[in-house]
Image (spheres, rainbow, N blue to C red):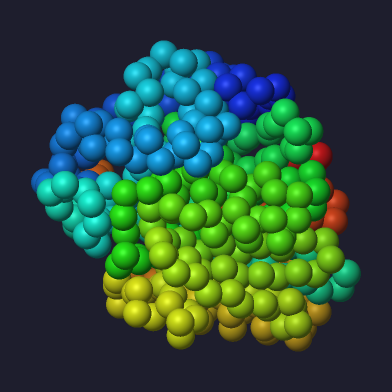
Amino acid sequence: MAIPFVHIEARGSYHELGRAVGEGARDEVRAAVAFFRDDFAAMTGGRLTFAAAERASLAYADHARRALPQYWDELEGLAEGAGLPLSELLVLNCGEEFTCSEPVEGSHGVAPASSRGGDHCTAVAVSSQGRHIVGHNMDWYVIDAVNNVFFDLIDPEGTRVMGIAGAPYLLMLGMNSHGVASVSNSVHSTDNRLGVPNVFVRRATLGAPSVAEARARGLLAGRARGTNHLFADTGGTLWDVETSATASAFMDHSAAGYAAHTNHYVSPEMLPFEGSDHVESRVRLATAERMLAQGLEDEEDPVDLVARVLRCHEPGPDQAICGHPDESEPPAGQGMTVGSMICDLDERRIHVCAGPPCENPYQTFAM
């Protein structure tokens, strides 16, 4: 039986968008916050309590509010709609910043955390047979799988965005009505600093009217840490932008007709900023690239090909693109594929599921 998720449709100001999500998914938001509140010390290797993270989040709040006030308004609306303190939602939306295993410059004694339970995301894209398809598996803590929201939002500028994410977060991944997809993966940058949290940067790229504008938004000055952005459009553009807090690299995969990225830096320019050996990440990337190249050679339907990649369990459980929790671990140490999506940019359709796509059928939504 498929894992259910909440479907939220909203339009209006950014505050109204957030409030609609908070009201429509109140139980899911509260359940996710409760999990983090109870397990945060375990998530951070005993280095940071949830209460301490609330206090520390104020420094990140200042940067987010100044740089991206519209998305700060959206988060305020989410907290208001869910009936929770904004500081609690901010901790979850600074999840990468607080659970990272690398030091953060200027964090005033907050020690780096241990390796987290999730952080095994895979992004893929195909431009073939006149089709432009983007896929993503979002891996994070197990709690998100049962507390997902499908976001269908129209912002004040008239841009419609769609994607699936955990209920307490700003939407970070998906496609928009301009035919642009933005999917991103965590990387372990070593120059982390107090700045604009990754969730806010990713949310900004999602509403961009072009890949060029999405790239510019992903390179926002003052970002707190790195991420990898994979951007695509209906013109066949496949761009990959790797960032750290202070550096970036650009790779154009348009000519190849496919692209993939996992959780480590690929560009030589970014290797000095690599904070983890990511052996399993390299295995996942090799698997995805091999499957995409072979599928294009075989002229496989692009949607079917992307779905097959996202459901892949090769070569084994610890290196699989489709991730399942290790139930021998405590809940705070369990990561899994909490949601999956396939964006058909030409048809303006998105296929989404909560949980691993091997077990949960995709549901289709059209713009």
Q: Quadrant of the C terminus?
A: top right
Q: In the shown orientation, is residue 209 left or right of residue 51?
A: right
Vertical position of residue 22 compared to residue 333: above or below: above
Whether residue 288 sits left or right of residue 345 in the image: it is left
Q: Position of residue 244 (x, y in %)?
A: 42, 65
Q: Quadrant of the N terminus?
A: top right
Q: Position of residue 34 (x, y in %)?
A: 29, 27
Residue 58 visible in the current orientation: yes
- Tell me where residue 361 appears, x and y as whole percent: 63, 48
Q: Residue at x 53, y 74 (%)?
A: 249
Q: Residue placed at 57% from the left, 68% from the top? A: 241
Q: Is residue 35 visible?
A: no
Residue that appears at 50% across and 16% down: 81
In the rendered image, residue 143, in percent from the top left (x then y), is placed at 37, 39
33 vs 238, nearest the viewer: 238
**Number of numbered discs on residues:** 0
Image-quadrant location for residue 62: top left
- Which residue appears at 34% of the width and 74% of the height? 274
Query: Could you say which is closer to the camera, residue 69 or residue 144?
Result: 69
| Farthest right residue in view | 130
